[in-house]
Image: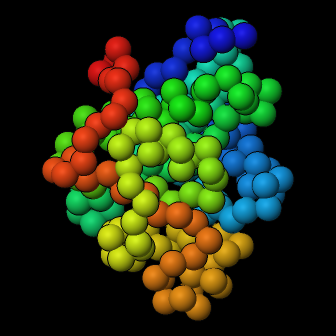
């Protein structure tokens, strides 16, 4: 199987059918890795799909293969690329990188002046972010939007974040500032 066996695109209304499966896999994956994750509801994931703020990968047989979404914070000054997940059946094929790349360019298209950021505990995601042009930063360089930080409440590591007064946690913060940083990735055809 190769990436040619998948359709990777901005999610559409009919993709809402996968919201529950996506949320379940996000939670199961975090448990299996022993890492924290801000939990999302199927309704929240469906809203990102309906708002054209999500990227989905489908296998040619129609099976859900991967997902990611964007959310704006601080009145659109910051955009988080979040919820990157690949169906375990389709891992280790380059799907995460392809989904993350499309999500990155979707963010730039919808919010051209916003700083893009993400929090991750995964080395693979850190490497993908680095390949896109993100840099590791301190939490002080991220949004101060209280609504964003409320999303961390459902993470098992939230007490650590609180005890450190939101200066750091177990996640690595990564930021891409389009005003300063150079895009390192090739734009997907759809953009």
Q: Is residue 92 visible?
A: yes
| Residue that extends furthest to the right in the rendered view of this protein | 32
- 87 left or right, relative to 132: right
Residue at 44% in and 45% down: 130
Q: Quadrant of the N terminus?
A: top right
- 106 left or right, relative to 12: left
Q: Is residue 92 above or below residue 137?
A: above
Residue at 32% in and 70% down: 141
- Number of labels in the image equals 0
Residue at 67% in and 35% down: 86
- Report x, y in % for residue 64: 68, 25
Q: Is residue 109 above or below residue 149?
A: above
Q: Nearer the viewer, residue 130 or 62?
A: 130
Question: What sort of colour scheme is used for the picture?
Answer: rainbow
> Dividing the picture into quarters, in which one does residue 112 lie?
top left
- Report x, y in % for residue 174: 43, 58
Q: Is residue 52 above or below residue 94?
A: below
- Report x, y in % for residue 44: 54, 51
Q: Nearer the viewer, residue 115 or 51?
A: 115
Q: Quadrant of the C terminus?
A: top left
Q: Is residue 64 visible?
A: no
Q: Is residue 46 above or below residue 57?
A: below
> Dividing the picture into quarters, in which one does residue 163 lie?
bottom right
- Report x, y in % for residue 176: 32, 51
Residue at 63% in and 78% down: 158
């Amino acid at each position: 199987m190769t990436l040619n066996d998948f359709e990777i695109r901005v999610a559409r209304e009919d993709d809402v059918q996968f919201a529950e499966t996506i949320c379940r896999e996000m939670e199961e994956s975090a448990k299996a890795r022993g890492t924290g994750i801000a939990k999302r509801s199927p309704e929240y994931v469906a809203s990102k799909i309906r708002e054209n703020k999500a990227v989905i990968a489908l296998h040619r047989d129609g099976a859900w293969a991967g997902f990611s979404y964007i959310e704006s914070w601080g009145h659109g000054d910051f955009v988080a690329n979040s919820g990157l997940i690949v169906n375990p059946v389709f891992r280790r094929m380059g799907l995460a990188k392809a989904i993350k790349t499309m999500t990155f360019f979707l963010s730039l298209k919808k919010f051209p002046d916003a700083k893009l950021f993400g929090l991750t505990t995964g080395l693979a995601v850190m490497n993908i972010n680095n390949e896109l042009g993100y840099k590791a930063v301190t939490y002080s360089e991220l949004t101060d939007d209280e609504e964003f930080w409320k999303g961390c409440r459902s993470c098992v590591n939230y007490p650590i974040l609180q005890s450190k007064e939101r200066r750091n946690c177990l996640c690595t913060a990564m930021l891409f500032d389009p005003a300063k940083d150079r895009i390192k990735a090739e734009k997907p055809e759809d953009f």
